[in-house]
Image: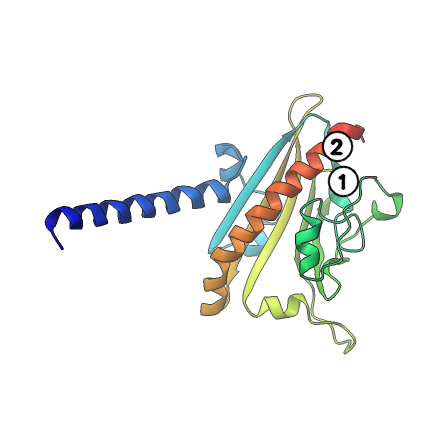
Amino acid sequence: MSRRSSLVAVSWFVALAALKVAARRVQLRWGATDEEVAAFMPGDERVSVADLIATRAIGIDAPVEAVWPWVVQIGQGRGGFYSYDWLENLAGCQIHSSDVIEARWQTVEAGQPIRLHPDVELAVAALDPPRSLVLGPTAESDDPRDTASSDDLDQLYDFSWAFVVQPDGSSRSRLVVRERYAGRSLLGRALVEPLAVVSFVMTQRMLRGIRDRAESTGM
């Protein structure tokens, strides 16, 4: 290989590496401000040392009280996730995102299961209405009828998934979603990065879905 060809190859390698780093930074903090990325969020204490942290956010032209009802009713068999239902359903999730606020889904409590899939569930780890909802792995169960779901995930990594609604003036708000992952094994640490990419695709759509619903209904 000539010197010129070598320089071209090295230049392409450096450019692709730089693009990958830039793309990673964008997807891990999509829509979030520097202050939101740096801020301590509810649920952060649950995974104090994380291999990967993602902070994604969106501005909503509606007050906190109009955003919270959409957040609190998330879940499979509940209000859905306001993302790409068709894509989630390819994996058998049976998700049907609601376009209305349902009173039956407005009350949750610590420890309550929130399903991602009929056989995969998380639990409400912390709750501070109307400001924050934190989901994490379910507590261990002795009931043999329970599907392992998040127990299987626990073998790979620990994680927290926080939804934080913050006021932004008198009639606007910010919805911030914070994810923290800590691999429990080499496989878990290897899966964190590709998982974050999938999460980005679904989360940015979810944030826009919640924004559109809150802005169009006012409640």
Which residue in the structure is indicated by mark 1?
70
Which residue in the structure is indicated by mark 2?
214
Between the residue at mark 2 and the residue at mark 1, the CA separation in whole angstroms equals 7 Å
User: What x and y, as percent, mark residue 159?
Assistant: 58, 57
- Residue ID at (83%, 40%): 101
Q: Determine the residue located farthest toward the top in the rendered image.
A: 170
User: What x and y, as percent, mark residue 178?
Assistant: 58, 45
Task: Find out whether the residues at labels 2 and 1 contact each other: C-beta distance under 8 Å.
Answer: yes
Determine whether the residue tagged by mark 1 lies in a helix, strand or loop. helix
Kind of residue indicated by mark 1: Trp
Determine whether the residue tagged by mark 2 lies in a helix, strand or loop. helix
Kind of residue indicated by mark 2: Ala
- Residue ID at (68%, 55%): 88
Based on the displayed image, in which of its 4 quarters is residue 66 positioned?
top right
Q: Is residue 129 something that shows in the picture?
A: no
Based on the displayed image, in which of its 4 quarters is residue 46 positioned?
bottom right
Q: Is residue 181 above or below residue 39?
A: below
Q: Is residue 62 something that shows in the picture?
A: yes
